Image (spheres, rainbow, N blue to C red):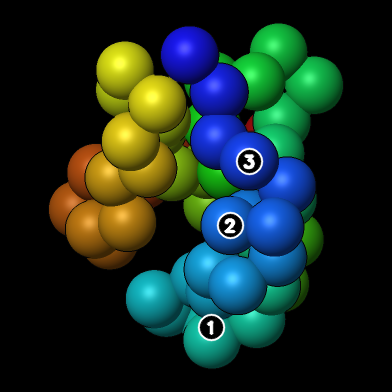
């Protein structure tokens, strides 16, 4: 299950308040500014700072 592009366009990083993008493998929403990846589970983005993983 994936997130619709129009929904992704409305989401922002809860840390930096900047737009998010879907990762290449479609399992996370990434914030380039905060260098964080928020998981997507069963098509639902988990936009909690404590759930985010640092980007390499």
Residue 20 point in image, percent of width and height: 66, 60
Going 54% across and 68% down the picture, which residue do you hit? 11
Single out the mark in the foreground, 1 or 2.
2
> In the rendered structure, which disc, 3 or 1, sits on the residue that comes first in sequence?
3
Does 6 appear above or below 46?
Answer: below
Circle on res. 7: 2
In-front residue for pair 40/56: 40
Disc 1 on helix, strand or loop? loop
Residue at left 63%, top 41%?
Answer: 4
Question: Under tag 2, what secondary structure?
Answer: helix
Q: Quadrant of residue 14?
A: bottom left
**Is residue 35 visible to us here?**
no
Q: Marks 3 and 1, Cα distance to the nearest angstrom?
A: 22 Å
Q: Which residue is mark 3?
A: 4
Task: Give the mark toward the camera: 3 or 1.
Answer: 3
Q: Is residue 27 left or right of residue 15?
A: right
Q: Are marks 1 and 2 in contact (CB under 8 Å)?
A: no
**Circle 1 is placed at which residue position?**
16
Query: Relative to the observer, which residue lies in front, 27 or 10?
Result: 10
């Amino acid at each position: 299950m994936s997130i619709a592009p129009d929904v992704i366009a409305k989401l922002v990083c809860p840390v930096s308040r900047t737009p998010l993008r879907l990762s290449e493998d479609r399992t996370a929403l990434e914030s380039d500014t905060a260098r964080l990846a928020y998981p997507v589970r069963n098509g639902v983005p988990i936009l909690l700072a404590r759930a985010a993983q640092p980007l390499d």
